[in-house]
Amino acid sequence: MNIKLETERLYLREFSIEDVQLLIDLNADEEVTRYTGDGPVKDLEEAKRILTDIIFPQYKNNIGRWAVHLKSSNEFIGWCGLKDIQEDNEVDLGYRFFKKHWGKGYATESAKAVLEYGVNKLKLKNIIARAAKENTASIHVIKKLGMTYLKDDICAHDPAEVYVYLTK
Ligand SMILES: CC(C)(COP(=O)(O)OP(=O)(O)OC[C@H]1O[C@@H](n2cnc3c(N)ncnc32)[C@H](O)[C@@H]1OP(=O)(O)O)[C@@H](O)C(=O)NCCC(=O)NCCS
């Protein structure tokens, strides 16, 4: 297992091809994907394609969406991480968790570690986060992380806000 980061309660690891079912399970709840622009993952083939075409290529730059697990039980609770959006010259911070794990501070805890890693280790300058205005929990997390409002935008057809992490 390729563990990338550890926090007090969590560890973050790279996804592997064995994780197809985890992606299907996570996206199966329409409340989880309500503001994310994607939806249910159809089948194992589609999950495999997401891993090989979207998630794994990011890992070569030492960034990516990482699987998040509870240290206490090893349970997979969702993902958190960075995505290089080359056409916009920005790196996007994102996160997604099973509903039963919402409201326990896991998004904030994992995203804080990811941000610190991006800034201090990778020396990234342009880390942004984008969330639908109605996704108040996500906007709240972004603000708790100390990110600064940059502009309004559209995210998956919904009015959204973009925040940036300003480094010194
Ligand atoms: C957004 C999401 C990642 C937040 O994860 P989480 O682990 O519950 O987040 P945290 O517990 O770290 O923090 C959530 C904060 O928002 C607050 N919050 C929760 N629901 C809220 C709501 N409807 N409105 C305003 N604030 C809300 C919580 O009280 C908490 O703040 P606090 O620590 O000051 O009390 C989670 O809801 C999720 O996975 N949603 C589905 C996927 C998604 O939308 N991803 C983001 C796409 S931009």
Image: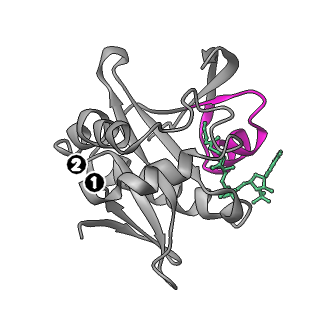
Q: Which residue is mark 1?
A: 121
> Residue at 53% of width from left, 53% of height from top?
25
- Image x and y of residue 106, in percent: 60, 63
Judge: label 2 CB < 8 Å from ligand 1.
no
Q: Is residue 87 left or right of residue 102?
A: left
Give the residue at the far bottom of this rendering.
Answer: 72
Given contact means CB atoms under 8 Å apart, are the residues at marks 1 and 2 in contact? Answer: yes
Q: Specify the amino acid type for callout 2.
A: Asn
The range drawn in magenta is: 130-148
Q: For residue 168, what is the image quadrant?
A: top left
Dot 2, how many residues are within 10 Å of its Cα: few (below 14), some (14-19), or many (20+)?
Answer: few
Query: Is residue 134 at least partly visible in the picture?
Result: yes
Report the residue marked by disc 2. Answer: 62
> Front-most of 144 and 25?
25
Q: Is mark 1 within 8 Å of ligand 1?
A: no
Label 1 neighbour load within 10 Å: few <14, some 14-19, many 20+: few
Residue in front for this viewpoint, 59 or 7: 59
Res. 33 image quadrant:
top right
Q: Quadrant of the N terminus?
A: bottom left
Q: What residue is drawn where x is 48% and y is 38%?
A: 41
Furthest-left residue in view? 60
Q: Residue 146 location, x and y as percent?
A: 61, 46
The image shows residue 55, relative to residue 18, as above or below, that is: above
